[in-house]
Image (spheres, grey):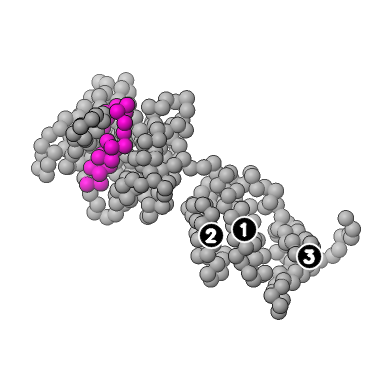
């Protein structure tokens, strides 16, 4: 994770104090103006975020959860957007999402960059430690003045309770990132408090890449078998699917696959079919271990029981699939016969 995020930098941030929730409590103490940052403070927060994310897990948007946070994060990627109102909404929502067990802390919304691309980071930080904050009135309203106490930095006393790191996305449904929860300890890095991951951020853990790859492949084959009528298109789509699964690319983009390989209405129909089958239409890390046997060869089985199969590259050279006049399929195999019989 550290290598992936090495190019991350902090640009600006705003801070709100979120007290422990109590009956009749006044709620969070909000800033009206982003905090002033020195280069030292930018570096301090950058290191805190990177250290926290060493224990992070990958997450994606959970569309079943209603929360304002994804929309407010998305707003941060719009030109000329303000940190103030979105972060205030987040602070209020965090306060309402917490129980009386959750400790008080500082909610910080960070805008930064990763490899020159915008990112948004949400932090819940311990109030005491190597960073001291003091509320003050400035032009424009209330804010928090942050002081970095160098003599305490070496002791790393300030705890980052929770971190959500989100690279730029263009629609809420495509929101994905990394979340860490240091309050859960280091023995179970995949354990993130439900109130923060789900109720607050509106996310869920991303599934294992092997499971995601298998689910996509199964749904893609179902689409080809159930929704594509032209025999030559069925064969072409299946060949393309197997080729993409066998490629050395570590990631797979369903939208790119549809645009590149599927014809006419099949492209949109394919994406709709995936979403209807609970397969998220987004780029995913490809891992074909669970489908290795299925992608070794191309195969067609006829209703009559006749089956034709072979390696994908040889299939492309030797097999032709076309539609007969009656709507049936004609499969032609060119080459020398090796043997007959079982």
In the rendered view, would you say 99 is above or below 60? above
Q: Is mark 3 on a helix, strand or loop?
A: loop
Image point 18% across, 34% down: which residue? 26
Q: How crowded is mark 1: few (under 14 residues within 10 Å), some or many (20 or more)?
A: some
**Residue sitting at x 29%, y 54%:** 78
Dots 2, 1 in contact, CB < 8 A: yes
According to the image, label 1 marks what residue?
A: 222
Q: How far apart are marks 2 and 3 (CA)?
A: 28 Å
Say whether residue 274 is magenta: no
From this viewpoint, which residue is outermost toward the bottom? 325
From which residue to which does the magenta span run?
A: 85-108
Q: Can residue 8 be seen in this view?
A: no
Q: Name the residue under label 3.
A: 304
User: Which numbered dot is residue 273?
Assistant: 2
Report helix, strand or loop for mark 2. helix
Q: How far apart are marks 1 and 3 (CA)?
A: 20 Å
């Amino acid at each position: 994770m550290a290598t992936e995020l090495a190019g991350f930098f902090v640009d600006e941030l705003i801070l709100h104090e979120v007290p422990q929730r109590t009956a009749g409590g006044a709620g969070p103490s909000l800033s009206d103006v982003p905090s002033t940052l020195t280069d030292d403070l930018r570096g301090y927060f950058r290191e805190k975020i990177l250290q926290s994310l060493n224990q992070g897990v990958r997450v994606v948007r959970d569309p079943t959860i209603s929360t304002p946070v994804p929309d407010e994060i998305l707003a941060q990627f719009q030109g000329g957007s303000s940190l103030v109102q979105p972060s205030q909404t987040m602070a209020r929502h965090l306060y309402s999402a917490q129980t009386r067990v959750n400790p008080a802390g500082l909610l910080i919304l960070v805008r930064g960059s990763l490899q020159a691309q915008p990112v948004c980071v949400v932090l819940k930080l311990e109030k005491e430690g190597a960073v001291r904050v003091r509320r003050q009135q400035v032009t424009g309203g209330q804010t928090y003045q942050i002081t970095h106490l160098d003599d305490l930095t070496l002791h790393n006393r300030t705890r980052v309770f929770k971190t959500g790191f989100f690279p730029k996305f263009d629609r809420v449904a495509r929101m994905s990132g990394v979340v860490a929860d240091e309050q859960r300890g280091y023995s179970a890095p995949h354990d993130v408090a439900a109130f923060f991951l789900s109720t607050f951020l509106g996310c869920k853990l991303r599934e294992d890449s092997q499971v995601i790859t298998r689910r996509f492949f199964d749904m893609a084959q179902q689409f080809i078998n159930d929704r594509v009528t032209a025999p030559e298109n069925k064969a072409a789509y299946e060949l393309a699917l197997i080729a993409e699964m066998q490629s050395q690319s570590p990631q797979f983009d369903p939208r790119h696959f549809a645009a590149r390989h599927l014809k006419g209405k099949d492209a949109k129909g394919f994406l709709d079919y995936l979403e209807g089958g609970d397969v998220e239409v987004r780029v995913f890390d490809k891992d074909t271990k669970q489908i290795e046997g299925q992608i070794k060869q191309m195969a067609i089985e006829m209703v009559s029981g006749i089956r034709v199969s072979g390696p994908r590259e040889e299939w492309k050279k030797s097999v032709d699939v076309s539609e007969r006049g009656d709507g049936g399929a004609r499969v032609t195999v060119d080459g020398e016969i090796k043997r007959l019989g079982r």
